[in-house]
Amino acid sequence: MNEILIRLFKPLSIAFFTMVFFAASNSSMKELEFTIKQEKKLEAHYRRVHLFEKEKEEFGKWIQASASYPEIPSCGVIMVKNGEVMYMNTLRCAPDKLFMIASFTKTFTAISILQLAEKGILSLDDHVSRYIDVSFENPQLKTDPITIRQLLTHSSGLVDNESREKTSNSMPFYIPEQKYPAGYLFSYCNQGYIILGHVIFEVTGIPLGDYVTHNIILPLEMKDSKAPDNTQGAAGIECSIRDLGNYLSMLASGGVYKKKRILSDRYFSEIFRESVFTPPGRNKEYRGIAWRIWNADGSIYSFNHAAHMDGAGGWMQIFPGSRVAYAFISNPPVYETEKFYGFYQGMKYRLLKLASLLMEDEMDPLEFTPTKPDGNDLKNYTGTYKNEGDGSTINVWLNENDSLFARKSISYQQYPLAAMSRSTFVYIYPGQNEKGELFDFVWRNGAVAGLGAKEGYFIKVE
C-alpha cells in the first residue's frame, strides 16, 4: 500500500517542487531583469553627465571663438533644470550685466495680461475696443472684431504697417493695418503688443513698466532687471542673464517660482491653446500666447521665443516635461548681419544639444520637425485664390515632380514653395538662408479656404 501511495504521489511531489523552483526562478529572473535595467539606466545617466560636462567645455570654447568683437560685444547664456542653474557662461561681461531683451518683453506682457484675466479684471476674449476707443478692423475684410487673445497670439490680422485710413489718432501709438481677417492666420505684429501694453494701463491705471516690476520682476527675485518708464508691450525690459534663469525656472515649473505662484495652472495652460486651426499631424508647431509651441504626439513638448532688434539678439526655450530651460542674450549693434546670423543659429543648435543631455528623454529635440504634407496632401492647396480688394489672384499648382508652385497675377512671377508645416509654405529669396515670403494657407471646415500672402488675404475661388 505504501509503495502504491509513493508511486502515486511521487510525480505530484516532483511537479510541486518543480513549480516552486520555477516560481522562485521567475521571481529571481524578474528581480535580475529589474536590476539590470536599473544598472543600465544608471550607466546611461552617468554617461550623460560625463557628456554634459564635456559639451559645456566645448560650448565655452565655441562661444569664445564665435562671438567676435565688435559684431557681438558681449553675451550670456544660462540653462536651468528643476529650478537649479546647470550651466551659465558670459563673455566680456559679468552675470549681472543688463541686456536689452527686445521681444522677450512680449512674454512679460503676455503674463501680465494672463494675470489680469485670472483676477477677472479683463477677459481674453473681450474685444480690444472695449478698453481702447479705437476701431482696428479693416471694413474691406468683413472681419470679426479683434480680441485680446488674438493680439496675444498674433492672429489679429494686424501688421506693422500704419493704416492709410487711420492716420489721425490721439492715442500714443499708431493704428496698424489689418491685412487679414481676425483669427484666420498668424502674422507677427509688434504693434499688437504695444496696444496690449496700453490695455494694461487702461484697466489698472499703472504704466506697463511698473506693473511688470511689481507683479513679475520682484516676485521672481530678478534683482538686476528693470522695466523702465519707456517700456512698451513689445520691447523695453532689461535683464541680466542671471535673472533670466529665475524667469526660465518659473516657466519650466508651470508658473511657480520657489513655491510662489506667479500664474495659475488654468491661465498658464492658456499659453498652449492653438490660436489658428491647422490640420492634425504627429508634430505641430504653432503660435500660442506669445510663445511658439512644439506639440509632439498631442502633448506640449516645448515653447520658445526669439529676441531680435539692433542692440539685442537672443533665444529662450522651455521643455516643461523635463523642467529644463535655457536662454541666451547678446547685444549686436546690428543683428541683420551674416556674422550674427551664424552665431545665433550656432547658439540655438548647441543649446539644444546641451539640453538634450539634461532631459534624458527618448525624443531628441534636435530632431523635432513639424509634420509636413506629402505628395498626395499637396493637392489640397492647389487652385485659384482671389483678393477681393484689388481683384488680383494667386494660382497654386503642382508640377510633374509633385512640387508646389504659386504665380501672382500682379507680377506673373513664379514661386517654388517649400512646406514648413501643414499650413505654412515659404519662398526663400535667391542667395538667402532664411529670408523669404510666407504663404499661409487658411483651413476652414477641413478644407483650404484661403491664402495669406504679403499683399493681403486671398479667398479660394476654384
Image (cartoon, rainbow, N blue to C red):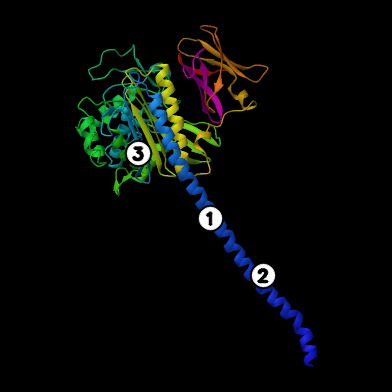
What segment is highlighted magenta in the picture?
Answer: 425-453
Which quadrant holds residue 142?
A: top left
**Image coordinates for residue 154, horizontal then vertical, percent:** 39, 27
- Magenta region's main secondary structure? strand
Disc 1 designates what residue? 39
**Image coordinates for residue 304, horizontal then vertical, percent:** 41, 33
Disc 3 designates what residue? 248
The amino acid at mark 2 is Phe
**Image coordinates for residue 242, horizontal then vertical, percent:** 29, 36
**Image coordinates for residue 147, horizontal then vertical, percent:** 35, 29
Question: Mark 3 falls on what kind of element?
Answer: helix
The amino acid at mark 3 is Leu
First in residue order: circle 2 vs circle 1: 2
Check residue 343 in the rendering and tell me which mark sits there, or answer none: none
In front of the other: 411 or 261:
261
Spatial CA distance of label 2 from label 1 is 25 Å
Which quadrant holds residue 130?
A: top left
Residue appearing at x 60%, y 67% in the figure: 27
Q: Residues within 10 Å of mark 2 (few under 14, many from 20)?
A: few
Spatial CA distance of label 3 from label 2 is 53 Å
Disc 2 designates what residue? 22
